[in-house]
Amino acid sequence: MRNNETKGPAKPARRRVIKQGAALSAAGLLGPVLSSSVFAQGDDLAPYKAARINWRQAEGQEITVAVIPASYFENLISLQPQFEALTGIKLRFEKVPPGQIRQKAVLDLSSKTGTYASHASDPMYYPLYVANKWVEPLDTYLNDASLTDKAWFQFDDIIKAWRDANSMNSKPYGVPYDGEVTVQVYRKDLYAAKGLKAAATLDELVANAKALNDPANRMYGIALRGFAGAGQNMYIYPSILKGFGGNWGSGGKVVVNSPQHVAALTWYVDTLTAYAPPAVRNWNWPDIADAFSQGTLGTYVDAHSSAAVINNPEKSKVVGKIAYATWPKGPAGQCATSIWNWGFPINAALNDKQKKATWLFIQWAACAETQARTSWKFAGPAKRSGINRVSLWKSPDFAAAMKGMGDNFIPAALDSLEHDTDVDWRPRVPQWPAIGDTMGTAVQAALVGQKKPKEALDEAQARIDQIMKG
Amino acid sequence: MRTATTAAARRRTRNLVLAAIAGVGVAVWVFPVLWGLLTSFKTERDVLAYPPAVFFTPTLANYREVLFGASSILPNLWSSFVVATAATALTMLFAIPAAYALGRLRYPYKRASGFYVLVTQMLPPVGLIIPYYLVLQKIGALDTYVGLAVIYLTFALPFAIWLMVSYFEDVPLEMEEAALLDRAGRMRALWHVILPQVRGGIAVTTIFVFLNAWNEFLFAVVLGGNRVRTVTVAMFNFISVEQTQWAKVAAGAMLAMLPVILIGIFAQRHIVKGLTVGAVKGGGRR
């Protein structure tokens, strides 16, 4: 019985079960109810028991982990019984809407309530967490042989850019569970018809957008996130800034109005004004993906995970017409992908036993086996595309699971992850939440034409100077 | 004869114009609701269709998913019901005597106390989230029905008191005097003579308080959790970071509206009466 859900002759049988399960799910009513039981991922614990640690050392503890409602966490939630069977720890997940999870986490951490043993955390919040000692440095856990089997866990296999994003002063504070890469997404059919190829530079990106732009026929050249916010337009703008060779200052001073900033913002405003749908100023990425899936966009640059939406046959009209490329390089000859990931830290307000339990949870969630079980081994329809390990990204199983996403999906994402990352993609300071909002407002003000880019950035600079003085 | 016809014609024109204006007003109000209703019966593909499809094959899949699917909102509807009912009951329990006192009794610093009730309404709710969170955490009432209901009470009470004071003021003083002369005590006079007069006001206030509690989001999301998750918070979870499931959001919204609409229909008689009671009687104000 053991082990046969991963290898061996039982595999085809299991596939058939999955298919039947998927058909049930498609039939509607019963699918979702049964999904956690019928879609058993194989509750074999042997791959975990290969780790030379005592998984039951925190037996009887109870921990609550806050996550957002997203399929990549739903997949993990469905494995919760396996974790409890493995460790004897009682694990509760709490789903908090994405707009509120930071606020709730900060309230919990700052009041030292210990409500959430861990939570899906925004990498940009580690400077704040660490400055206040709200979360545990994880090197001690990683280096403790009774808690971590290093050879089994292979922390270094986790994508470096994401590990770095969750580290402060080269100490890890959160372990990446799921992450995103920024990629260029384009309609290969339209590109081929006009003899275009994927842009290698921002200039080419604009030229492609111009060639495809045809508002009279509801076709727009390009879209980038336009909605104001730390996680919206401030997701895309920092990458453009890096392309223009800009940075966020150094030595405790945050600079947002350098000539590179002005050039980057001007490019963003001009490009979107000329070749994007007028509503883009209020669009976050789901809106962009929706527009692309309806065939009204030629290109967009955003998270690779949006591939699931534009390839959703229930919604999308462009399945089979999609290809991917890396973020085009800017005038400075570089490009930078987002280093976004959802990581798990340990709440410092817990007692030692609870901390151990939380670490076991983190190790379980981030290890290769769980990553696989929430991706290609997952029996439900949503196979995670944001797995956290280089070795898994390169595995044929993952390639097979991502085959339907379109041309060049994994190579484009991997290329970006290995070459286009910059941990200082956004200013890593404790004041980030306020800075992110200020910049989000400034970028949008420029986009809607309320202010000139330089003017908007100068005002943001003045406000940020105030924030930094604090 | 001729003048009569022109007068009738003029009246008809005027009625038509008024009806047109009213129609536009109603349309503006109805449009979003109708749009939501249509969306709730569409597939995600139809939601995004352009030009928007007015005729489409309706589906109940969204309602099925929202009610019985993996993220069913039934428990959340129940949570909302418990919190809103408890908050409303508590609020009315305190607001009725308080409004009566403010409207009728004479006591020192009456004006000041009335003003104080209003002042508590002037704080922006956002500023209270952190203090409330800390207080509830200290007493272990985070993510509990009691905690959330008591927090709602603090907002609803001033509002309810101020809404009801005017109703109490409108009851002719003579009625109460008559009751007192008949040797009824204050409480008895309040219960048997005054309250029946302000039924409408109480109904209106109850509905508003219930509505506000039912629709509340900000505090529910921060002070609630896994155990107490109101329907507004649950619905928000359909807008995930991956995609916005518009059809499910719409189906959830329609279901969340339903109880409130039902209550509104049942209570309509009282509301109308309540809104006009001051207008017809008059003269009772002191």
Image: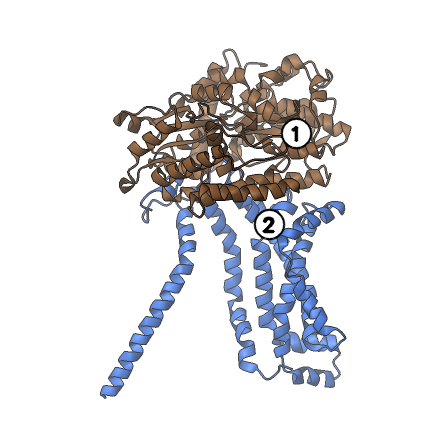
**Residue farthest along the front direction in this orientation:** A259
Chain appearing in brown on the rendered image: A
Quadrant where the N terminus of chain A sits is top right
Classify 10 Å Cα crowding around label 2: few (below 14), some (14-19), many (20 and above). some
| Residue at 72% across, 19% down | A147
**Quick check: can you spot residue A101?**
no
**Residue A216 at what x, y percent from top left?**
27, 42
Q: Amino acid at mark 1?
A: Pro
Q: Mark 2: which amino acid?
A: Leu
Colour that chain B carries in the picture: blue
Q: Which mark is residue A345?
A: 1
Q: Which secondary structure, mark 1? A: loop
Q: Which mark is residue B218?
A: 2
Q: In which quadrant of the rendered image does the C terminus of chain A lie? A: top right
Q: Is residue A119 left or right of residue A197?
A: right
Q: Nearer the viewer, residue B23 or B120?
A: B120
- Which residue ends up furthest to the left in the rendered image? B2
Q: Chain of mark 1?
A: A
Q: Chain of mark 2?
A: B
Dot 1 crowding, Cα within 10 Å, few <14, some 14–19, many 20+:
many
